[in-house]
Structure formats: structure tokens, C-alpha cells
Amino acid sequence: MPEHLPRRQVLRTAGALGLGAAAAGALTGPAEAAGTPDRLATMGAHHGKLEIGKAPFGTTPDGKKVDVYTFSNGRMTISMLTWGATIQRVETPDRRGRVKNISLGFDNLPDYAALSPYFGSTIGRYGNRIAKGKFSIDGNSYQIPLNNGENALHGGTLGFDKKVWSAKIVQSAKAVGVAFTYVSPDGEMGFPGELTSTVTYTLDRDDNLRIEYHATVKGKPTIVNLTNHVYFNLGGEGSGPIDGHVLQLNAPKYTPVDATLIPTGEIAPVAGTPFDFTKPTAIGARLRGDHPQLVVGRGYDHNFVLGGKTGADGLRFAARFWEPEDGRTITVHTSEPGAQFYSGNFLDGTFRGIGDRAYRQGDAFAFETQHFPDSPNQPNFPSTVLRPGQTYRSTTVYNFGTK
Ligand code: BGC
């Protein structure tokens, strides 16, 4: 463990079901002693109680208070921070009922601020890369600060992942969660127009985590591509490589990239390549092959073009991940046309996570539903322009199960 990092208290996995136990684990941290949740809402129970609580998580260097919200359906428990509207913990049972946190993260705010490679973050204003940080709308040119070699990544140096969002509890008979809102001023990170984004995360009784993105812009047209960058390891965070996870992707095509991970513009078929996950295949099965796209990405770090049409609910099946040993599954449906499947290639063990174990290359995956990277510079990709008077909407549902 590098010396400059504070030794952190190791958090217990909540283990038992219900908010009391979960909060004891999730809300206890070194940055601040666990607060007593100042609000506890319970909404009846069929298969389990829907509960939510809030506690202080820390304070930013410029004095902003950050809270952690912990919500549960009696079977699974999710903790989210107002810092970056971040998914901090996702505790789910395996097929034998053993509960583990399957999402990578930290137990304290300084580590999120200094180290986090977008663990659980809500990403904005533009998910993934914009070539050289440049784009234009209606003949006006804009420059985003570069933070990934010669490109801009995930909204520039100070993206939405590094902002404190306002939060409001949402609850119904069926689901519980938090609506996070952030107002990004005109010109922030070089983006035009004042953008108001609300991202609502709710957990229902059927173990669906539903993420609904909503945004409007004032003053000038802008570009928007919101996503969440949660990293999962279905054997438990910090439990080692995800090579054995089996993936099925509803993606007949993908967008190959250049050496700086900017799409070349080509929309290529996956058939006959290591990018073909149309039939369930272990992530590690072809990961270390010599396909040039796997070499430039150091593994999978590509946008997949989802197949088929969205259903009546506006969603379509995107992917299913399955960890055969403990049996956990995640099934993803989305309204988005694409998803970045990232096999944790740039995790390099330099920092330790919430369970005090180093995260190394390939120890997690992210599956970021989104419009395609660099769309503002790629005329053949679906547009990401949002104009005043229009509403940006996007929905992604993660279902957590076992098999
Ligand atoms: C990008 C990766 C990057 C990761 C973490 C992904 O969305 O495609 O290249 O390393 O986010 O920043």
C-alpha cells in the first residue's frame, strides 16, 4: 500500500439484511463517525421492507458536506454518495444467500476525490472520449480540457463525478431511492449552455436498480451523454479477476478505436472476432489474444452497438453477466444505443478499495450504457446534441439475480 494513503478502517460487509445492519457497515467510516440516519422511511413489506437512510460521509476541501444514502429492499442494499451521485456499495446475496458488496469503491471521501477512476460515478456532461476535446455545434467551436492524453474523457478534468449533487429521497409502494440533481453552468469544462441534470436511482422489490437520466439546457445548444461508471465484480469487490464471468451481449457490432481509444468511425461486425459475445462466453476466454483492438485497449474498452429495437417500455436487453462460482447475475436493459464494455484494464493495484484489498488489472468490469464515444465528431453516429426546449432522457435498469 503506498505510504501517502491513509490507512483506512476496513468496513464490514453488512451481511444481514435490512437497513440497520447495512447502515452499520455502509455508514461507518474514518472520515466521520457514522451518523444516525436522520430519516428512515419504511414502506410496508411483502418480500422485504423498502428502507432508506442518510448519514454524513465527509466534507470537501471547499467545505461542502457530502452524504451517503443507503437504501434496501430487504434482500439487497445500495449505498450512494452525493459526491458524483456515486454508487458506493451494492450488497447482494449469492445463490446460497451469502451477501457481499460487489461494487468497487472507497470508504472515505478523500480517496474518492484523489484516486477514484470513476468508481460508481455518474458521468457527465459527456461520457467517454471526445477527440482532442474539440467539437462544434452550429459552427461554434468548443474546447474541453484534456485529461486523457490528447483527448477529453468523461466530461473533462472536473466532470460531474467530482461535483456534489443535491439529493431528494424518492419512494413509492414499489421502489425506493434518490433523485440527484446537478446544475452545470454555461461554459463549465468548456461545454456550452446551462445544463440541469437529474439522475434518479431506485431499487424495487424485484432487485431492479433503475437509473433514469433527465436533462435540459438553457441559453445554448450543448452535447449530453450521461452514464454511470459502476465497476462490478460478481464474486465480491477485491476478490480477484473477472476472467471467469460469463457475458452475453446483445451487440452484433462495435466501434473499433485508434491508438488513443477514439473510434475510427467504422461500425464493425463482431462476428468472427473476440468481440462476439452474442452467445454467452467467459470474459477471459479471448482477452489475452493478439487481436489488434484488444492490444490497443489493453483488453476490452470498446463501445458496443446494441442490436434490435427497444420494446414498449423504451428499453432493450443489452447484456447479462454471470459469475458461475457464487452464481450472481446482472442483467442490463437500456434505452441507449450503445454501451462501453470495459474490463478494468487500467486498474493497476496502486490503491486499495473499501474492503482494503488492492484492485488490479481485470479485477472488475464496467458496462456504461451510452451514446457512442466521440459522437460530436462522428457524423455517422447518433447525435448527442441537446437544444434549449428539448429534454434528454435515458434509462438503464440493472437486475441483480442468481443462477
Ligand atoms: C474508458 C476507459 C477508462 C475508464 C476509467 C472507461 O469508460 O473507456 O478507457 O480507463 O473509463 O476511466
Image (cartoon, rainbow, N blue to C red):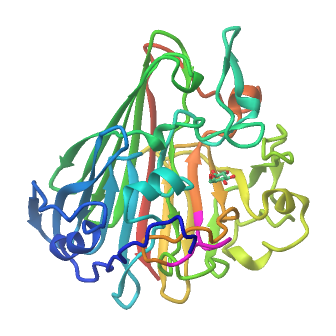
Residue 355 is one of the magenta-drawn residues: no
Which residue sits furthest front? 3
- Which secondary structure type mostly characterizes the magenta part of the structure? loop
Residue 37 lies left or right of residue 212; in this view the side is: left
Residue 112 percent across, percent down from the top left: 45, 55
Residue shown at 46% from the left, 58% from the top = 111
Q: Residue 189: x, y in percent?
A: 56, 27
- Which range of residues does the magenta coloring cover? 357-365
Task: Tell me if I can see residue 316 in this picture.
Answer: no
Q: Quadrant of the N terminus?
A: bottom right
Q: Residue at x 33, y 87 (%)?
A: 97
Decide: is 270 above or below 234: above
Determine whether 315 is above or below 195 in the image: below
Residue 204 image-quadrant placement: bottom left
Estimate the x, y position of residue 96 in percent, counting from the top left.
Answer: 37, 91
100 displayed left or right of 114:
left
Q: Quadrant of residue 13?
A: bottom left
Instruction: Answer whether residue 143 is visible to the viewer in this image.
Output: yes
